[in-house]
Amino acid sequence: MKVLKISNQKFGENAILYSLTNDNGLTMNVTNLGARIVDLIVPVNGEKRNIILGFDTAEEYLSKDMYFGATIGRVAGRIKDGSFSIDNHKYQLPVSPENGHTLHGGPESFEAKIWEAEIEEKSNQVSVIFSYMSPDGEHGFPGELKARVIYSLTNANEWIIDYQAETDQPTLYNPTNHVYFNLTGDVTQSVGEHELFVDADRFAVVDSDTTVTGELRSVDETPFDFRESKSMNQVFETRYEQNNLVDGLDHPFILNRTGFDQPQAIITAPKKDLSVEMYTDRPAVVIFTAQFGEMGPEVRGEKLVNHGGLTLETQVSPGAVEFDGFGDIILYPETIYQSRTIYKIN
Ligand code: G6D
């Protein structure tokens, strides 16, 4: 068994880039800036194709980032009005001036931190173990939270993400990864011709400010029905109000099952020469289709087209703080948080 390769190099002022390559020639680059994945470079028909959105420098992540590949925390998604209560204690988080809600744990959150990193090499996988200690009261969240995110690359072409955390006071924790896939490797091509499968009978309806309304709606007879693999264009070319409202998808899908025997989602490239399977123990996945319009940043020298990527952000659905039936994201001191998501490249 050839040894998997892992190397590291400077990546801006304080960041390090770790390059993991498996025996099939698949390379995953990750950085301690935001515990992010930067590149996912896959050999396809003799070419090397980078199938995710990312930048070439750490500075670009700090100046024009839309959470590309970032670990999101303490809480993925929006918390309405930035306020929540735990055991009758009320907390207030910093809110966006645009809409008065808190997105992805607040500004300069996990995605902007320099995480500790250590390398672990095993015979059939290599890992980078990122850790970050979020102090009590950071961004308004109670409790000191020790978070770990382990990225592993295997010789089965899997990117495995293991999340672990513990806290000394009851707090909220609902992390995810904000990777954007574009399986063409070309950021000037929209993901409209990609096919998507999602094993979800329901999705969460959103309001004009993309907070969930509390309604869980059947996907039946809607463009949200991806229970058979279908073209992404069905959400870009429809007149259905929930897609028109956000110009695509920016919605939680409530998964019918969790676990690692069958994928809950599959993205397939337009030429069907590549696919990514998603497996998770999380009950929902937020899919966002990068509708940045003219605001799309330059990515590796090319302007990102509208709908130039799509995310598969596994998590407890946004709305868990506000509504019953959406799940529970309170972490108590006596509990160790653990979750796993796998993206398998075929
Ligand atoms: C927009 O509403 C979307 C979010 O879901 C996404 O995570 C962010 O852009 C990057 O705010």
Image (cartoon, helix red, strand yellow):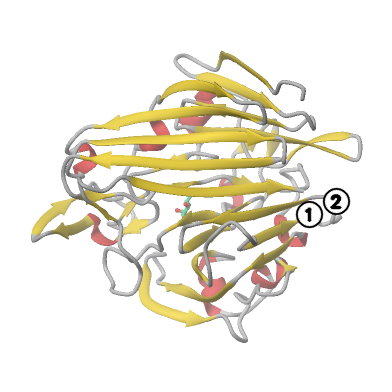
Residue annotated with mark 2: 273
- Image quadrant where residue 213 sits: bottom left
Q: Position of residue 73 (x, y in %)?
A: 36, 44
Label tally: 2
At 59% from the left and 39% from the top, the residue drawn is 297
Compared to residue 105, the image places residue 328 above or below, namely below
Is 303 placed above or below 301 here? Answer: below
Q: Secondary structure at mark 1?
A: loop
* Residue reaching furthest to the right: 46
Which residue is at a point 59% across and 85% down the rendered structure image? 220
Residue 13: % across, % down: 47, 14
Q: CA distance from mark 1 to mark 2?
A: 6 Å
Q: Tell me, yes or no, whether the two marked residues, 1 and 2, touch with CB atoms within 8 Å.
A: yes
Q: Residue at x 50, y 60 (%)?
A: 286
User: Dot 2 lies on which element?
Assistant: loop
Q: Which mark is residue 269?
A: 1
